[in-house]
Image: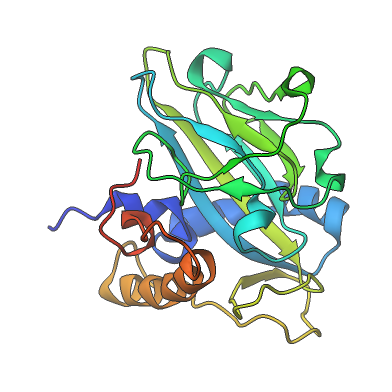
């Protein structure tokens, strides 16, 4: 059996694996999102963030809303291993989701876990940062405009974090029309397209559907980028 390209699990992994979609549809998880943004929900992505214990991979300070996203998207960082300071846990600046979108630069730094190696160039008080240290099974929730990042993993094992990303059906759509799987309630806005459920893990149909959806995401994120798409977005640039 062909070994799947697991780098594709960095974005829209719920289109490739039914068991990932089951996590998104877990009643406990959906209840939390419904409490925050209401019962009419779509999934923006199920994005794996795995860090090797090499002290290298990191995420610079950034806002997801700065490089193509619906507004708002709520991210749930679900820890599937210990995600403490030593493992390079997420960090955020409280209240920064109200600052508006800050200036970002992009890079091709191979150590960056982010799509375009992006980082904020405006100054702010990093001393205000809070570590989102998590034990397995815990989840931190934050707005996609929050200034956040993560350090390197100095632990003995790989760090497994799954970003569960949901948005309300009334969200402001990005400039390139995007799909999102309807997971709760109804959508009367008509601003987003539906996504196909995976028929089996890494099946030819699931992979074709993933490729079609991610091609649209790639146009959104890399339209004006000097950094080409990584393996996680169907490109050739190495992804961490």
39 to the left or right of 55 = right
The part of the image, by quadrant, that contains residue 183 is bottom right
Quadrant where the image shows the N terminus: bottom left
Residue that appears at 58% across and 76% down: 179
Identify the residue at image location x=18%, y=53%. 3
Q: 39 or 100: nearer the eye? A: 100
Task: Name the one closer to the observer, 121 or 38.
Answer: 121
Q: Is residue 173 above or below residue 1?
A: below
Residue at the limit of the structure toward the left, as seen here: 1
Compared to residue 208, the image places residue 77 above or below, namely above
Residue 81 lies left or right of residue 111; in this view the side is right
The image position of residue 23, as x and y in percent, is 56, 51
Q: How many marks?
A: 0
| Quarter of the picture holding the C terminus | top left
Q: Is residue 25 visible?
A: no
Q: Position of residue 231 (x, y in %)?
A: 31, 56
Query: How far across and down, in percent of the image, does residue 216 sit?
Result: 48, 76
Seen at 82% across and 56% down, the residue is 34
Res. 226 image quadrant: bottom left
């Amino acid at each position: 059996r062909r070994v799947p390209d697991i780098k594709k699990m960095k974005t829209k992994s719920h289109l490739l694996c039914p068991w990932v979609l089951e996590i998104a549809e877990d009643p406990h998880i959906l209840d939390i999102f419904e409490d925050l943004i209401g019962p009419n929900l779509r999934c923006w992505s199920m994005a794996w963030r795995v860090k090797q214990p090499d002290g290298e991979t990191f995420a610079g300070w950034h806002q997801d809303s700065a490089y193509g996203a619906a507004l708002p998207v709520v991210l749930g960082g679900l820890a599937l291993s210990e995600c403490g300071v030593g493992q390079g846990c997420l960090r955020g600046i409280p209240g920064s989701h109200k600052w508006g979108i800050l200036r970002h630069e992009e890079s091709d730094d191979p150590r960056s876990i982010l799509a375009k190696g992006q980082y904020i160039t405006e100054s702010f008080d990093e001393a205000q940062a809070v570590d989102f240290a998590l034990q397995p099974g815990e989840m931190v929730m934050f707005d996609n405009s929050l200034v956040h990042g993560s350090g390197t993993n100095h632990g003995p094992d790989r760090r497994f974090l799954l970003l569960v990303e949901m948005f309300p059906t009334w969200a402001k759509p990005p400039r390139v029309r995007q799909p999102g799987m309807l997971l709760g309630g109804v959508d009367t806005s008509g601003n987003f397209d539906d996504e196909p459920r995976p028929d089996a893990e890494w099946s030819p149909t699931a992979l074709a559907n993933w490729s079609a959806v991610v091609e649209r995401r790639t146009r959104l994120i890399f339209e004006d980028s000097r950094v080409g798409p990584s393996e996680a977005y169907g490109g050739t640039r190495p992804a961490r």
